[in-house]
Amino acid sequence: MELSRRSLTTVLIALSSIILHENYGKKVSRALIKERSTISSQLQNSNEQLSALDPCGRPIHPKNESDCKSKTFSKEQYPNCHSFAGKPSRVIVKQIFKHGRQPGIIVEFNPPSTGFKDLWAFRVRLIDLTLNHPNVNTQCKQINSKMRDKFVVHFENLGYGDHYNLRVQSMPPDGDKSTVSHDIFIQEQCDILQFQKTKHCCLFSSVSSNKKDYKINENKAVVTINITWQLTCESIQQFKLKWNTDDSDCNGSAEVKGKHFYSLKLLERCVKNHNYTGEIYGVISDQEKTNTEQFWFTVTMKSPSSTCQAPTSGQQTSLKHMEMIAAFSSVGAVLGIILLVMLLKFYKFRARPIIRINERRQPMSEARDDKSLSDPVKVLIIYASCCMPCKKVIYSLWDALDSTCLFDIRLDMLNEPQLNENPLRWYETQIKEAEKILVMTSHEMLMSDLNLGSNQNNLSDYVNIQFQLNLLRGEVSNTTDISKFVPVYNTYNGNRHDIPRFLSMCRAYKLPTELDKIMFHLLRINSIRIHSRTPIVQISSENHPFLTKKDELIKAIDDAASFHQHISCTQLSEFV
């Protein structure tokens, strides 16, 4: 009896545990099903939101204010869907520059004035064109109503000096009918006024060197060269200098702190007709430095004048003898002056350089005598657009030089097909390949170089003259041959003071009076010695085209001068 009771109790306990486990399992399964349903609903809502916003231009509420029920726009399937085909209006781009941050832009625009209230979105794309591998940055401004009349988009972390293409497009897209495109050139950091006083943009405004004195110490001649410099800022106080010449034993370097000058002392063996090239840069930190500025100087040592000692013994010279010596000395001095004048005239007229101009360009492989010139010199002409008469002067100069068959002239206005492909690349390539660069300076060019002119590009410029000068400034810093750069000016729109500062060490010429000297410089001619009197420019015939082209150049310069006398500088941009 006791055993049966225990068995019954065990069975009842087992049944109750089974019932409890079954009820708990049902509750757990119901909770899991509910949680899975919630997660699935959240994922579905998230996917719906993503599909509504990506890609740009899908309507969020297709059932409201629109007959376009599909998320994919199709005129064939929905002919009554008249979403905007108009372009965004009043697109304004503002550049933003702040210390310690990369530049940015703000794009402001208004909706188009045509269409219905079913506009989907605006797509704003910024394409980086600087590295020839476009990097596209896209932003989408969703809109389903025309109640808003202004939209703003920000782009940050752009590059100084970079070139971008901005495209603002109404969605759904309709090709060029719904797109506004703008080219944007971000300024170089050091061309912006607020950064020009910082260490990173500090430039050398001038570097000069001159011989101070000549001394003999302990039977050794010593020449002191004073090197002075000025900068556009005052925050840099540490500088490093280097100087080099053909004799490696005379090369050296120095470090200067707290001063803007350095006294370089050279011994006798380093000053005998030596040409020195030097460079200087400012130290910002252990890893940073300013741009390097180059300078040149030539040192020629004169032998010390020997001293005359009075005789200590012998007979004294009579007064009559002294008078004869003085008379002969005077006659000798007069004859010496006459001989010197004759020699100067002889070299002026009988040893002048000449330019021989033939009627046709000779092939490069054709044999030439010792008086012939080398192959045509590659010359690039750079100028700032001012007015149509000034452009006529540039063209006439090209025409005159080209008629000589001595030059291969590169001019942007004659190479429009190549310029339209990539203007900046064309100028960069031509500056590097040119043997000589003819810079037609003017007051307009100087104002642009100093960033004092208009911020807008001249419509007649293929590339803003500021960017052309920046490319030229980089080429100047990378070469030691300053004769490659030839500044030229006309008195009607400039003078020697209007030459950009980084070209101030180059020899400048004036048109049209120094055209022959310009040709000498371009041809790298110092002197061609001959034994007969000949003109500077030797023409092969009386009807050579160069004579006519030179007269046309002079007439074009006179016309431009007359034009500038009647039109003020503020009105010149209207005639470009």
Image: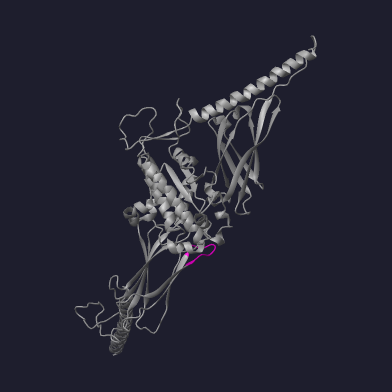
Closer to us: 348 or 33: 348
Q: Quadrant of residue 148?
A: bottom left
Q: Residue 404: give x, y in percent of width and height.
A: 37, 40
Closer to us: 517 or 420: 517
* Residue farthest toward the front in the current orientation of the protein: 542
* Residue farthest toward the left in the current orientation of the protein: 76
In this rendering, does residue 188 appear at all?
no
Q: Is residue 100 magenta?
A: yes
Closer to us: 105 or 317: 317
Where is the C terminus found, in terms of image quarters? bottom left
Q: Quadrant of residue 254?
A: top right
Q: How is the image coloured?
A: one colour
Q: Residue 519: give x, y in percent of width and height.
A: 44, 40
Q: Is 33 on the left-hand or right-hand side of 334?
A: left
Q: Is residue 309 above or below residue 527?
A: above
* Residue farthest toward the top in the current orientation of the protein: 314
Magenta segment: 95-103
Q: Residue 415: give x, y in percent of width and height.
A: 34, 52
Q: Residue at x 53, y 50 (%)?
A: 499
Where is the N terminus found, in terms of image quarters? bottom left
Q: Is residue 574 magenta?
A: no
Q: Is 99 on the left-hand or right-hand side of 419?
A: right
In this rendering, does residue 482 appear at all?
yes
